[in-house]
Every structure is written in structure tokens, then in C-alpha cells.
């Protein structure tokens, strides 16, 4: 178990020099079969399923509701009706804040296969947990969008089913880049907000981790809704595509998997090997052992 000591510069937090030690949890095993025999593991899977279901239900309903209210052909609607793009972004960011807050103590509140993948690369979760989390998230997303279609069947197909597609005028490369960068911002925020070293260093400034994570989702949606509708969550894109089952949604589906997984991998590597200096620590340990 890695243990470090943080020194807080004088003048910060109103005190002089202070030391705050912290412990990094040990790396998760690559394959931990024991997890399959624990109720806490299945409880976490249920939490991920339900959280992703609720996430898709609220957010896709918001998207369809806005399109319905702003449709000129629907009761004389106008472009200013409904929540607007700003409201859609708030719906996604707000739901992430709520659901991460509610489930973080049970499953970590991933609610996103790309986030789970990034945490797996950083050895925060085992391969078994990562794979089954992703399955639970995708199933929850499909069920959540299924509920939307069941309750809004008259509007669901008419307004695109909330499916992510590449907008007209943008190349596939642009869409892929938007998903990579957007997911990098999200996963980078997740690592930073949950970093035990940061919590120790800034213990005098309480930070509620779900808040910056939800705000990151909000900001990314503002930037990329015009480009791809904002995926950054493969489960969200898959759930909408499965229920909507449109050729365009399936043609662009690869963008919403490849982009987020690349962005998550870059964020995990950047945080672990640059910000947390794991590469330098490993090199230092190697040099020390070589001098023995």
C-alpha cells in the first residue's frame, strides 16, 4: 500500500506547516473470482443498473420533450419553447450529480462504461467488476429508454428517440475528436475529484465529488450537443440506438464507443503517470533496487 505525506505551505488554511498523510488503496486484482460470491458485488451491479436506467429515462425524456415543444408543426411551437440546449445539458449534468451522490458508496457511481474502463486501466476495479458493470450499465440504459418509448410512444420515433447521431455538416473525424476530448474531460474530473492525495492536501476545503463530475458533464454537453448530441457514455448511446433502431444511429454508433474509450484511456494514463507521477515513482524504485 502506497503511503505519502503532503506538506501544506504556510499561510494556506490559516495554519503553518502541516502534514497530512494518506493511503492509496492497493491495485485491484486483474481477476478476482471471490467477488462473484459476495452479495455486495451484486448489490453494486443492481445499483449501476438502476442508476443508468434512471439516467436515461430522465435525460432522453428531456430531449424528446424539448424537441416536441419547439416543433413549429406541433401546436405552433417555436424555437424558444421548452428547456432548450442549456436545459438539456443541465438535465444530463444534474442527473449525474444526483446519481453519483446516491450510488457512490455502493458501486462507485460509474454509470458509464467509459468511466469504468478508465478506472480499470488505473487498477481501481478488477476485470470481473469492470465487465459486469458495463453489462449492467448497458442493460439499464436499454430499459430506461424502453420506458421512455412506452410512455411517449407518440413522440418517441417522431423526434429521433434521443439517439446520438453525427450532425449534418460535421465529418466523422470531427465527431470522433469531440467524443474523445469530451470523455477525457469527464474521466479526468472523476480521477481528480476522487483522488485520495487531493483529499488529503485540500482537507481544509471540503469537496463533494459528485458536484464537479456533474458539472463536467454539463459543460461537455454545452460544447458537443451541436456536433454529436453528446455521447461520452457508450451505454447512453447504445440504449437509445437499440430502442430507436434507426440506420443512421447504428452507422454512427462506433463513434460513441471508440471515442469515449480512447478519451478515458488517455485521461487514466495522464492522471496516473503524469499528475500522480507513477512513472517517476516506478523509475525511482527501479534505480533504488539496482543500487542495492
Image (cartoon, rainbow, N blue to C red):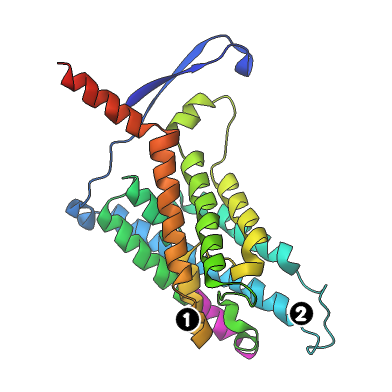
Q: Residue 130: which quarter of the image?
A: bottom left
Q: Residue at x 64, y 66 (%)?
A: 225
Viewport quadrant of the N terminus: top left
Q: Reply yes or no: does residue 151 show up in magenta.
A: yes
Q: Residue at x 59, y 51 (%)?
A: 216
Q: Earlier in the sequence, mark 2 or mark 1?
A: 2
Residue 81 picture location, percent across and down:
81, 74
Please provide percent x and percent y for residue 276: 41, 33
The residue at the point 50 percent across, 69 percent down is 236
- Per the rendered image, the range of residues in magenta is 144-154
16 lies above or below 107? above
In-image side of 134 versus 166 (left or right):
left
The residue pinned by badge 1 equals 251
Task: Give me the C-alpha separation between circle 2 and circle 1.
Answer: 28 Å
- Is residue 246 visible in the rendered structure shown here? no
How busy is the neighbourhood of tag 2: few (under 14 within 10 Å), some, or many (20 plus)?
many
Q: Name the foreground residue: 286 vs 134.
A: 286
Q: Residue furthest left?
A: 292
Q: Residues within 10 Å of mark 1 (few under 14, many from 20)?
A: few
Q: Which mark is residue 266?
A: none
Q: Secondary structure at mark 2?
A: helix
Quadrant in which the C terminus is drawn: top left
Query: Tag 1's secondary structure?
Result: helix
Location of mark 2 (residue): 69
Q: Residue 91 location, x and y as percent?
A: 65, 62
Query: Quadrant of residue 148 in the image?
Result: bottom right
- Please tell me whether residue 116 is drawn above or below residue 67 in the rendered image: above
Image depth: mark 2 or mark 1 in front: 1
> Taking the image as drawn, is residue 82 in sight?
yes
Amino acid at each position: 500500500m502506497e503511503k505519502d505525506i503532503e506538506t501544506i505551505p504556510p499561510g494556506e488554511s490559516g495554519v503553518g506547516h502541516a502534514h497530512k498523510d494518506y493511503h492509496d488503496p492497493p491495485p485491484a486484482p486483474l481477476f478476482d473470482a471471490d467477488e462473484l460470491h459476495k452479495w455486495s458485488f451484486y448489490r453494486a451491479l443492481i445499483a449501476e443498473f438502476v442508476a443508468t436506467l434512471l439516467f436515461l429515462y430522465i435525460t432522453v425524456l428531456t430531449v424528446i420533450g424539448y424537441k416536441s415543444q419547439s416543433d413549429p408543426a406541433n401546436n405552433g411551437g417555436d424555437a424558444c419553447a421548452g428547456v432548450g440546449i442549456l436545459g438539456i445539458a443541465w438535465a444530463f449534468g444534474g442527473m449525474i450529480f444526483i446519481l453519483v451522490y446516491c450510488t457512490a458508496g455502493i458501486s462507485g457511481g460509474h454509470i458509464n462504461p467509459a468511466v469504468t474502463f478508465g478506472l480499470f486501466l488505473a487498477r481501481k476495479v478488477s476485470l470481473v467488476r469492470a465487465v459486469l458493470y458495463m453489462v449492467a450499465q448497458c442493460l439499464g440504459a436499454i430499459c430506461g429508454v424502453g420506458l421512455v418509448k412506452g410512455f411517449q410512444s407518440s413522440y418517441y420515433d417522431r423526434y429521433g428517440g434521443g439517439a446520438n447521431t453525427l450532425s449534418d455538416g460535421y465529418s466523422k473525424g470531427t465527431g470522433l475528436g469531440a467524443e474523445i476530448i469530451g470523455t477525457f474531460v469527464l474521466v479526468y474530473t472523476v480521477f481528480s475529484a476522487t483522488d485520495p492525495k487531493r483529499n488529503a492536501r485540500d482537507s481544509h476545503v471540503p469537496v463533494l465529488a459528485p458536484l464537479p463530475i456533474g458539472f463536467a458533464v454539463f459543460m461537455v454537453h454545452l460544447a458537443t450537443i451541436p456536433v454529436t448530441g453528446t455521447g461520452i457514455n457508450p451505454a447512453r448511446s447504445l440504449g437509445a440506438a437499440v430502442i430507436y433502431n434507426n440506420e443512421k444511429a447504428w452507422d454512427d454508433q462506433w463513434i460513441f464507443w471508440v471515442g469515449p474509450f480512447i478519451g478515458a484511456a488517455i485521461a487514466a494514463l495522464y492522471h496516473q503517470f503524469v499528475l500522480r507521477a507513477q512513472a517517476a515513482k516506478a523509475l525511482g524504485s527501479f534505480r533504488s533496487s539496482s543500487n542495492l
